[in-house]
Amino acid sequence: MNTLTPTAVDWLLQQSRFSIEYFLETKNLFPFEKVTIPEQIKEEVLALSGAFILIESYFGNKRIAYTRGENGVFERVEPLAKIVHQVAVNAAFFDPHTPRLKNFELNEMVLHLLVPSEKQIVSNGRMGLPTELAENSTGLILETRGRIAYDLPQMISEALSVEQRVRKLLLRLGVKGQKAVDSVDFYTFTVQHHSEVKRE
């Protein structure tokens, strides 16, 4: 996973925000063939990659951050520049856990771009559930019988223990009982995390 240059990061985040604003106005995705990519970043942003967009908003007078929407893909089958256009719109308008973004929220949101690494297998259910990870900077993937559930590294939400995170993902998969857990494969992944307000 090559580290993106600051120029590429800025352009990708600008494109993500533009795609959300364009969808708000037109109810359509901006055609990727009309996207103009600066020559100096073409190689980076046209590389096949997975990507996630996470939308952060704020609640109340204390400006407490919360996740307003997220979407993404792990598969490296599309150019990064194309993926961010699609997943930004999905995060803003089609995340089943949050209502659709409204016009007045545009100035309140901060976009985060997460580029995932290759997944690394930790264990399967027969080896026992994973209980320790490298802090909260590690994402989790659970797979069973062609289904997948994941959570991103915990960057703006309340920290949960590994056990709590695994339990939440097992529920999302509808997995109950030890026999079912035995069929689950557990993976971890890391991300390059970039945002409109800071870079890490």
Image: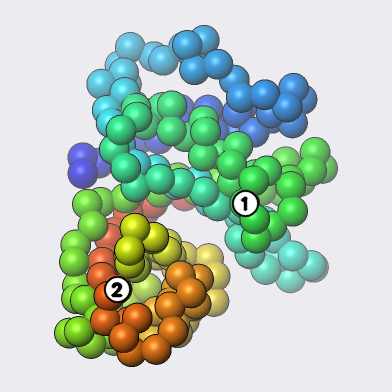
Q: Earlier in the sequence, mark 1 or mark 2?
A: 1
Please give the residue where the numbered disc 1 appears in the rendered image.
95
Element carrying mark 2? loop
Residue 30 lies, with reference to residue 173, above or below; the image says: above
Left or right of 101 on screen, residue 175? left
Q: Amino acid at mark 2?
A: Val
Left or right of 131 on screen, residue 37? right
Residue 8 lies, with reference to residue 100, above or below; the image says: above
Question: What residue is at 51 percent from the left and 30 percent from the top?
Answer: 85
Closer to the camera, 182 or 70? 182
Left or right of 110 on screen, residue 82? left
Closer to the camera, 48 or 11? 48
Question: What residue is at 61 percent from the left and 60 percent from the top?
Answer: 67
Question: In terms of image quadrants, where is residue 139?
Answer: bottom left
Residue 116 on image: x %, y % = 32, 50
The image quadrant where one finds the N terminus is top left
Is residue 8 in view from this perspective? Answer: no
Please give the residue where the numbered disc 2 appears in the rendered image.
184
Residue 33 on image: x %, y % = 47, 11
Question: In terms of image quadrants, where is residue 96?
Answer: bottom right
